[in-house]
Amino acid sequence: MSIHIVSTLLLCYVLIVTSPETTAQPFIDFSGAKVEYVSELNTSEDEYAPSFTPDNLKFVFVSDREGSIMKSQNYDNRGNPLPSRLSHDIWRVNFMADTFQIPEPWSMLNSPLNEGAISFGKSYLEFYYTRCNTANGFGDCDIYQCVFLDTIWVASNLGKNVNNDHWQSQPAYAKGGSIFFASNTPTSYDLRNNITNFDIFFTRYDSTTKSFQPYERLDNINTKDKESTPFYSFFDDALYFASEGHSPNYGGLDLYRSKRNPDGTWQDPENLGKHINSQYDDFFMTISRDGKHIYFTSNRRDKNNEKDLDFYKIVLP
């Protein structure tokens, strides 16, 4: 069963587990880190956009692997069916004793349309995720909130203060309820140079009005090139993201970290290092809220010499 419209309600029974917004720890030292291929999760299809639940007991991600829902059938101009494809769906897997169990599709969220990156709030019962090409959307892809109320799930579009007639995706829940996200919403630079770009934006959550405020662009994080896949780490109060425009850059999208200043502004980004980044695209980083588990996505050639999207684990010394 899928969530199709804003008012859709889904019956579901879940275990309520909350997680406080923890006090930030010292920043993670990546200087001696190693990168490992996650063979128990990767397939020959795409796996990307990983996220831990706040209690660190489940790992959620996006994939078009076997078991995803078939996209609606398309036809060529002669009426012949085109090759069928699976949609990009949300999958989840139990994570116990540092071991992944067998992944399964999160059926209530998935449809023949594409569903995307997911980010959890204070508990498993509140999350933000991407839905594309929906009837009640504002643009190609929009960001939705899904919350569990009593015995039902309620999904809603975050509205025009967050979504517009362009592309919004890759939400990242942060301390205080604010949301970082990626969008191709044009900036003054884009309009002046007639290009399409991707930048990182954020929307503040007003706890008084219980609403998200009009989105803002993170000026010192974005460049004239592509920035995407923001992730806020509760463990060290830092913003992680991927960029083609910051320096140094070791090829394609690299992973960067920006530390928060006491006044709430963000420091100049730092590259996580060439021992983590590759000559390919490295993006979609996630860190468990206890800081013990760090994963990201890359299209670097894997052990089978394939160049699909796979998961990699960062192992700290």
Image (spheres, rainbow, N blue to C red):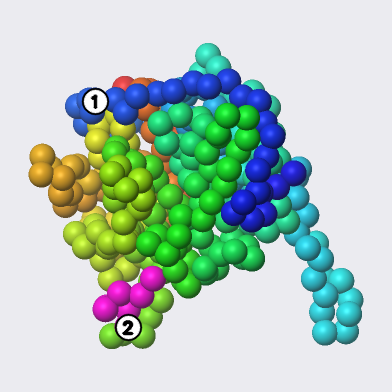
SS for tag 1?
A: loop
SS for tag 2?
A: helix
Numbered range of the magenta stretch? 185-191
User: 266 above or below 38?
Assistant: below
Q: Is residue 260 visible?
A: yes
Q: x and y percent of residue 21 in the render? A: 32, 28
* Residue placed most toward the observer, 296 or 197: 197
* Residue placed most toward the observer, 11 or 26: 11
Q: x and y percent of residue 1 in the render? A: 74, 44
* Neighbourhood count class around disc 2 (C-alpha, 10 Å): few under 14, some 14–19, many 20 upward: few
User: 261 above or below 13?
Assistant: below
Q: What amino acid type is highlighted by mark number 1?
A: Thr
For residue 183, what is the image quadrant?
A: bottom left
- Relative to 179, is 116 on the left or the right? right
Question: What residue is pinned by disc 2?
Answer: 191
Question: What residue is pinned by disc 1?
Answer: 23
